[in-house]
Amino acid sequence: MSRPSVLNARRSTSLRVRLMFFTAVLAVLFMLALLAAVRGAFLIALEQSVEKRLASEANALISVARLDDGRLSMPEKLPDEKLNTLEAKLLGFIYDREGNLVWQSRSSLDESVEYRPQFNGQGHVFEQGRDDAGNAFFIYDLERTQLQGQEVEFSVVTMQPASDYEAMYTGFIEQLYLWLGVTLLVLLGLLWFGLTLGFRSLRGVSVELDAVEAGTRASLSEHHPRELLRLTGSLNRLLESERQQRERYRHSLDDLAHSLKTPLAVLQSVAEVIATEPHNREQALVLQQQIERMSQQIGYQLQRASLRKSGLVRHSVRLGPLLDTLCAALDKVYRDKQVSVQRDFAAEQHLPMERGALLELLGNLLENSYRLCLGRIRVSVTRQGRVLEIRVEDDGPGVPVDQRERILRRGERLDAQHPGQGIGTAVVKDIIESYGGELLLEDSALGGACFRVRLKD
């Protein structure tokens, strides 16, 4: 994917989706940190539990130990049965000051754990070690300095394989993953629900904006959260400013048309008077042509200024009734031709334009087709994604390929037999461009010209 495509995809992503994504990332990071913390706390608690148990076993060994003539004596049967059988994994050892093993439990006879007592004066040591096979053991070393009131130096060591707790640890971790995963899913669901509720306010603004664009609402209401009131207020000021500006344009254009109508009519009358004299006819004809040209150029500029697309308000006009109006008027003008207009669009077809702009656009295209056709015109509408394409075709002589670009320029005409300044197509092109569309000129399947208007819905 190219870089512009990636940027466009990022811009088009829903704000709620983006917030949910970043929130989900933070939630996952939090859960991972919580997982590490809980696992660490469990390991600490587990080691403390093991230490207490081994300390208890070491103290139990001390409680049954005896001194006979200064030598350590232990009973045949110990209080904890796990120290009496070979199959048990609880090990017991007693070392003297020099590190010599002076006693070991029956359970440790088939184990080979290399350990030397530390005698570091701390009283006891809890650590981990390994046997010759690499198996891990928890080791508790209790330093004993008195026994039966006599001074002694013994190290009582109890050991237990770490594997005895691996199943417990594994089970705990599995349950931890399961419950944290379920908690994460529930949390994400609640976050999505909360964001959905939170975005209801934005959805309300969106609905009102749609109503403004459709023309069913003049402004946004004030029934929104406090954080959005500044935004809605700014939009309302923009809407009001646009409405006032359009009103000023209309008034100014009306005033301009009214002020120019009388001078042009006077000039037209003067030209007609001058034309009555034979020696002034040529000058009168030039004057009349210039007056007509001025009138058409003024009309063009007025249409161009008044038929611009609105910035925020989106219009929609039903095509069928509007086409009925235009065809009824043109049928009267060109009644001798008996023109047949074929319609190839849905009965409820709407076009995203102002009514005045659409009347001017289709009026110019249809008038051109009525004037040049032999008897058939076709108006069709197709959709390609978000693009609406309007085609106006006729069965007339068509437009040569090398002249098509020229005819779309302002003031250019190919038909010199009919009056006019060639600005009708230019008006159409300006209207279409103000709506972000384009005008194309091609050959028609009917044999004449095909004007294609492409608009974004």
Image (tube, rainbow, N blue to C red):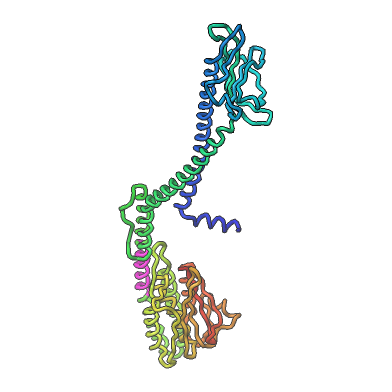
Q: Depth check: give the residue in front, 417 or 227.
A: 227
User: Is residue 26 shown above or below 123?
Assistant: below
In magenta, the rendered stretch is 244-260
Q: Is residue 47 visible to the viewer in this orientation of the structure? A: yes
Q: Position of residue 141 (x, y in %)?
A: 58, 19
- Split into 4 quadrants, where in the image is the C terminus? bottom left
Q: Position of residue 297 (x, y in %)?
A: 45, 75
- Magenta stretch, main secondary structure, is helix
Q: Is residue 266 visible to the viewer in this orientation of the structure? A: no
Q: Is residue 262 left or right of residue 33?
A: left
Farthest-out residue, bottom: 336
Tally of numbered tags: 0
Q: Position of residue 39 (x, y in %)?
A: 52, 35
- Seen at 37% across and 51% down, the residue is 197
User: Is residue 125 shown above or below 16?
Assistant: above
Q: Is residue 1 left or right of residue 317?
A: right
- Split into 4 quadrants, where in the image is the N terminus? bottom right
Q: Position of residue 416 (x, y in %)?
A: 52, 86
Whether 271 is among the magenta residues is: no
Whether 246 is among the magenta residues is: yes
Farthest-out residue, right: 132
Q: Depth check: give the residue in front, 121 or 261.
A: 121
User: Is residue 290 shown above or below 13?
Assistant: below
- Seen at 65% across and 19% down, the residue is 116
Q: Depth check: give the residue in front, 134 or 362.
A: 134
Q: Is residue 331 left or right of residue 125?
A: left
Q: Specify the quadrant of the image occupied by residue 6.
A: bottom right
User: Is residue 180 shown above or below 304?
Assistant: above
- Seen at 67% across and 31% down, the residue is 134
